[in-house]
Amino acid sequence: MELEQREGTMAAVGFEEFSAPPGSELALPPLFGGHILESELETEVEFVSGGLGGSGLRERDEEEEAARGRRRRQRELNRRKYQALGRRCREIEQVNERVLNRLHQVQRITRRLQQERRFLMRVLDSYGDDYRASQFTIVLEQEMR
């Protein structure tokens, strides 16, 4: 492979130039006179508490999971409360409708009785009856013992 180098440009390097020699397990490009990652591969990594993979990370994960569980339970509780309130509101609306219907029914009955009373008063007045001056006694039923 031939490479041309021009002033102000970088030379292109092919992948084949960095291929590993036969029998080599690790093919890394030579940097600074050697493989830069060799030293990193040979060192042992110790995990201390609070570091990567330590118990601190596990504890934090457990705390986050517990917090998620609490939030999930709270959302479920709120959803149940919301549904219960919705049911109760619908029940109250139905009761209010029944009361309102009964109120309208009583108003119609009252208007009808007032019309009948005015009619009877006109009829009695036309007969010359002195119903306004008469005594009206209502006998209530007595309890039987």
Image (spheres, rainbow, N blue to C red):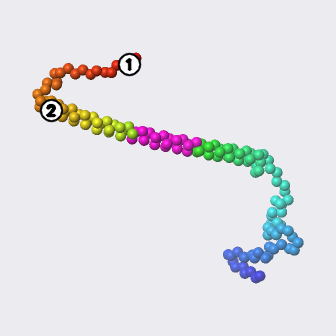
Tell how many labels: 2
Q: Secondary structure at mark 1?
A: loop
Q: Is residue 96 magenta?
A: yes
Q: Residue at x 55, y 45 (%)?
A: 79
How far apart marks 1 and 2 lie (CA) works out to 39 Å
Q: 26 or 66: nearer the eye?
A: 66
Residue at image location 29% in from the left, 36% down from the top: 109
Q: Position of residue 75 (x, y in %)?
A: 58, 45
Compared to residue 140, the image places residue 83 above or below, namely below
| Mark 1 / mark 2, whichever is N-terminal | 2
Q: Main secondary structure of the magenta part?
A: helix
The crowding category of the residue bearing disc 2, from other C-alpha atoms within 10 Å (few below 14, some 14 to 19, many at least 20), is few
Work out whether residue 89 or residue 16 is closer to the camera in this orientation and state it: 89
Q: Which one is in front, 97 or 80?
A: 97
Pointer 1 local density, CA inside 10 Å: few below 14, some 14–19, many at least 20: few
Residue in view at x 50 percent, y 41 percent: 85
- Residue hosting label 1: 144
Q: Quadrant of residue 100?
A: top left
Look at the picture and state if 77 lies above or below 6: above
Asked whether disc 1 touches disc 2, contact meaning CB atoms under 8 Å apart, the reply is no
Q: Is residue 68 left or right of residue 131?
A: right
Which label sits on residue 123?
A: 2
Which region is colored magenta? 77-97
- Give the left or right position of residue 79, taking residue 57 as reference: left
User: In terms of depth relative to the viewer, which is nearer, 67 or 76?
Assistant: 76
Point out residue 7 in the picture as x, y percentages from the top left corner: 69, 77
In the image, what residue type sits under mark 2? Val
**Quadrant placement of the N terminus:** bottom right
